[in-house]
Image: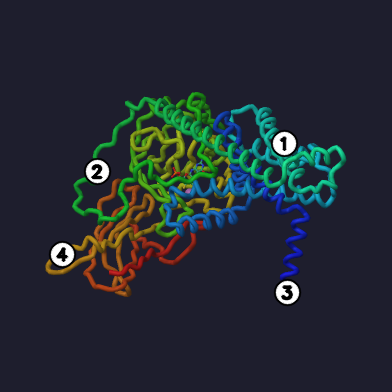
Amino acid sequence: MNRQLNAAGQLVQILGSLGLASGALAGGLLTAPLVALMYLLDKWLDLPFVPFELFDWIARVLPGPLITIGIDMMIDGIRFAGLSVADAAKTAEQISAVLLFFVLGVLATAIFFAVMKLRSIAPRPVSGLILGLVSGLPMVLVSLSMSQSTLNPVVIVLLVMALFLMWGFAAVMVYRHLATKSQELETEDRIRWAKSIDRRQFLVRLGAASATIIVLSSGVGSILADRERRQVRESIAGSMDESELITRAPFPNADDSVLPVPGTRPEYTLVEDHYKVFLRTEPTMIDINTWTLPITGLVDNPLVLTLNDIQNNYEAKNQYVTLSCISGRIASTLISTTWWTGASLQKILADAQIRPEARYIIVTSGDGFYETVDLDLIASDERIMLAYAWDGHPIPFDHGFPLRIWLPDRYGMKQPKWITGIEVTDEYQPGYWVERSWDEVAQVQATSVIDTVAVNDLVERDGQTLVPIGGIAFAGARGISKVAVRVDDGSWEEAQLRTPLSETTWVIWRYEWPFVAGKHTFEVRCVEADGTPQIEEERGNRPSGATGIHSRKTSI
Ligand SMILES: Nc1nc2c(c(=O)[nH]1)N[C@H]1C(S)=C(S)[C@@H](COP(=O)(O)O)O[C@H]1N2
Ligand SMILES: [Mo]
């Protein structure tokens, strides 16, 4: 025991003599204000925010399965914390990105201190500048390759480099104060050292300076961020003649007598509550003043369309749509329903005069995402549209402003947002997630979910007490013919179906179960319109979307 303690003590001493502890401390006190300054410069000048660029770069180069594990872990963590996945996932990602960058900064400084100590290098500015250069260079490269900044690349290189050089310079200054003993210094330095303040005082001042930069930068940065968000919203609002957009009529099923059980999710998702999934740490902002849609490749009449062309030259198609994400598990919140407006892709492609040998279109996006769509699929389904409005308003910037595609019956991964181009080709090319080993077709799996066992809304009927149970069922564009509920190991009992908003939305169902006190397990399953039963076998989300029965335990 004593020996172990001794060993531990020795280890601490060695670490201490290596300067790792003070290096880590210094790293924290210097990297946090660096992040804050970067945030300020991002919001002020549109300088790439290095922690996000680095995180997005890692996500792009890591193999797909590893990313999925990472996303799954994050989603589990969010669920565990009782937060809504749709709201919290991006925030969690952003926090992870900043934390990762912070940890790298701390590590780099600690290693720098250790090397300086081990090699007894005199703490001159040049060592700090080298630290800044070595750390900054990869970050500059990552930022250049990932960033969507509108700044001139030369300015980006200079500014990002300057920040890292300052950070490295500060590190060597701190090293000089914290990690050196006066005898290690050269004469000239020793004199200055003698005059210098003691370590504790130095740390207090460093901490205060660090905190001041953090508070000021993040304060001003968030004011600028608010302003930017307002401006983006205004530019989106001004991007199209909204009076030309059709307003949604009352819901087509408004007088259906089958009503959702209290506690069932809203049948129509508010746009601000619609789930969000996108590659990058931040949504892509497209400047509508310069945006056009080029349609190129195997066409006789290449087109360059503006948003107004798409809106005014084609009849508006409107459709209630449920969209869902292939990475959602059973009963995932990554599914939502709203009202889409757009132009027929068949008609637009007809105007481009596709050549007979053409087989596919490749749709590209402002964030580097891309997906291939088979021309046979487009020819077979006139509902496929290039959508520019949701719920009668321009599509919000985080949902793909100004243009996104809609493919009935497919998961979101096949449906690019922020469309920047369409190329017609005869060559198949796997899309972004297909390349990362997700399903090539990504047809939506039939799924049914229990949203609520409404123990507080018991129904009395014919002297019987009934517990209303409700939820949704969805099978892409294939429709739902039947939903059944089972309690404990009883028989499957058919639920009532509410008429859906359209043939491409989820169906709300309800079932009233004769009340029996106790702890019960409730299960649900559905059947597609053509009689195909929901797949009951439990399969994970990868590669083709999760299958299996949703069950829920409740004490009554
Ligand atoms: N350009 C682009 N389009 C994209 C994505 C993306 O990351 N970039 N994600 C896809 C995925 S995986 C899904 S589930 C849907 C989500 O759309 P939403 O965020 O509007 O709900 O967008 C799809 N289109
Ligand atoms: Mo997705």
Disc 2 C-beta below 8 A from ligand 1: no
391 over 323 or under it: above or below: above
Q: Nearer the viewer, residue 134 or 420?
A: 134
> What amino acid is at disc 1?
Leu
Q: Is residue 52 left or right of residue 253?
A: right
Residue 371 image point, x, y percent: 53, 43
Closer to the camera, 428 or 205? 205
Q: Any mark on residue 460, and which?
A: 4
Estimate how packed mark 2 is, as few (under 14), some (14 to 19) or many (20 or more) residues with alpha carbons within 10 Å.
Answer: few
Q: What separation in Å lies between label 3 and label 2 (alpha carbons)?
A: 78 Å
Distance from Cα at disc 2 to Cα at disc 4: 30 Å
Q: Which mark is residue 252?
A: 2
* Res. 357 visible in picture: no
Q: Amino acid at mark 2?
A: Pro
**How far apart are the two marked residues, 1 and 3, measured between alpha carbons?**
46 Å
Q: In the orientation shown, which residue stands out farthest toward the left?
A: 462
Residue at 47% from the left image edge and 55% from the top image edge: 78
Gap between marks 1 and 4 measured at Cα:
74 Å
Label drawn at residue 2: 3
Q: Assess whether mark 2 and mark 3 are in contact (beta carbons under 8 angstroms).
A: no
| Among the 4 quarters of the image, the one containing residue 551 | bottom left
